[in-house]
Each structure stands twice: as structure tokens, then as C-alpha cells.
Image (spheres, rainbow, N blue to C red):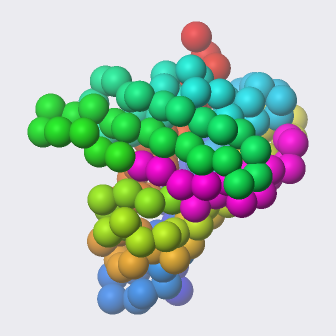
Amino acid sequence: MTTSQTSSTKTATIPPAGIQTGRIVVKRTIPATVDEVFDAWLDADALSQWMLPGDHRRNTVSVDPRVGGAYEIIMHHQDGDKRHYGEYRGIERNKKLVFTWFSNATRHTETLVTVEFIAASNGTEIVLTHERLPDHEAGMAHTRGWTRGLELLEVHFKR
């Protein structure tokens, strides 16, 4: 059993409290082409502009966009820097990205993120699945973070 929050352009599937699924799914339709949206995930400058889901205003981002390549996003918060990092496991141009994700919220254990890009009549639907989360708290934190990040990605394309 899962709980979903839905609107015409976004959905977040959140595991109910007490159930340790270790998996969340966040969906959002972005008003841009698949090419544009896909590239925004692999370009350090673009990532630094939209991957700002918390209370911070600035990121330092590096990416090596190839299978086996590393990425790092350092979110600069008032209470200190928060490092998010991992390795690209799969890159299918305009279709799918698969990468590991380590952060404070995952207790620096390896989790896995899959981002699917689906052409839609009004842009590109993103289906983001984050698996292997250590507990419900991590699932909730990442649901909020990814939901806000995709909102900011949409804003990035409305500029």
C-alpha cells in the first residue's frame, strides 16, 4: 500500500509509515523537449541552477557524464555543506539515467536512482525512482527533495 499525491503534472508515491519499502517514485511533466530535459541532468551548470531543493541558494557541481563516471553535488547550506555523490551506472540518451546516490540522508549507504524520460504532448514526463533507501525517514526526505528539485527543473525551463 502506498500513498500518492497527484496533480495534473506531478505525482509522488510515498511509502506509508511503518512499511520499509526502501523505494519512492516521483513523477512530473516538464514543459521542454526530451533533449533539453535529459541534457539538464548531465550538465554541471544546469544542475547547479535547478538542483536546489533545500534552504540553500548555491551548489558546486561536477559531472563526468559517462557510464562509470562520477558526479558530485555539494549543497551549500547555512549550517554547512551537504555532499551528494555517486556514479553513473546507465545512460541511454533521451530515455534513461541510472546512478548511485550517496548522501547524509542515505547515511552514506549506496542507493540507486533511475530517471526515465518520456515524450508527452505537453513536454517531457520524468519518472524518478529512488531505491534502496535505508528507512521511512530517508524515503520521506528524498520524496520532498526530489519533488522540490523537479519543481525547480520546471521553473528552469520557464525562464
Location of residue 100 in the rendering, given as x and y in whole percent from the top left corner: 58, 61
Describe residue 124's horizontal placement relative to residue 20 as left or right: right
The secondary structure that dominates the magenta segment is strand
Q: Quadrant of residue 17?
A: bottom left
Is residue 68 placed above or below 93 in the rendered structure?
A: below
Residue drawn at the location 35% of the way across and 46% of the way down: 83
Is residue 106 placed above or below 135 in the rendered structure?
A: above
Q: Quadrant of residue 81?
A: top left
Location of residue 36 in the rendering, given as x and y in whole percent from the top left corner: 77, 26
The total of numbered circles placed on residues is 0
Look at the image and tell me whether residue 125 can be seen: no
| Residue 138 included in the magenta stretch of the image | no
In magenta, the rendered stretch is 84-100
Residue drawn at the location 75% of the way across and 36% of the way down: 38
Q: Which sits in the foreground, 133 or 27? A: 133
Residue drawn at the location 60% of the way across and 47% of the way down: 70
Location of residue 79 in the rendering, given as x and y in whole percent from the top left corner: 12, 39
